[in-house]
Amino acid sequence: MTNSQLLDRVRSMGDHEKQVLSLLTFGYPNKQIAGVLGVSEATVKFYVTSIFASLECSNRTQAALIGLCLRHGLSVEGIVGRHRAYGAIHRFMDRFEESCIGGKARRH
């Protein structure tokens, strides 16, 4: 799925789903998201499941990475699909470092 397709899907989400996706990018757990939005934890779980379906991802990490990529204008290639989320984290960080500091930073 391309960035453009994902952006269209995010745009078609409801306001609460967009807020939940944004909070997922900060690593908030469902309980904290529920508190911020003033809804039940079960409602947040419903929104998270809906986000997974909309973005065709299978876990919070992938959803958060997609949200971060879209926010920073980075490619989502390799985050969704058959690749594992762990590898997607490293690909995202490499792209993020490139866009922020103009080159790959060394990993320790």
Image (cartoon, rainbow, N blue to C red):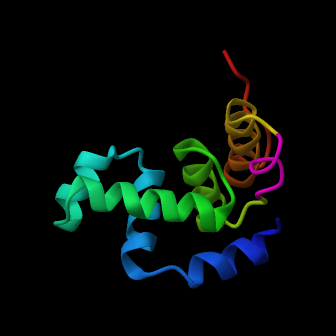
Residue 30 appears left or right of 17: left
- Quadrant of image for the C terminus: top right
Residue 24 appears left or right of 54: left
Residue 96 percent across, percent down from the top left: 68, 49
Q: In this view, does 75 lie above or below 86?
A: below
Q: What residue appears at the point 24 percent right and 49 percent down from the top-left corner?
A: 32
Residue 71 percent across, percent down from the top left: 59, 66
- Residue 73 within the magenta-colored segment of the rendering: no
Name the outermost residue toward the top. Answer: 108
Residue 82 appears left or right of 32: right
Residue 10 appears left or right of 81: left
Residue 82 percent across, percent down from the top left: 83, 42
Q: In this view, does 99 lie above or below 3?
A: above
Residue 93, by quadrant, is top right
Q: What residue appears at the point 52 percent right and 45 percent down from the top-left corner?
A: 60
Q: What residue appears at the point 37 percent right and 54 percent down from the top-left corner?
A: 45
Region of the chain picked out in magenta, as a range: 76-82
Residue 92, by quadrant, is top right
The residue lying toward the viewer, choosing from 39 and 93, is 39
Q: Is residue 50 above or below residue 16?
A: above
Residue 59, by quadrant, is top right
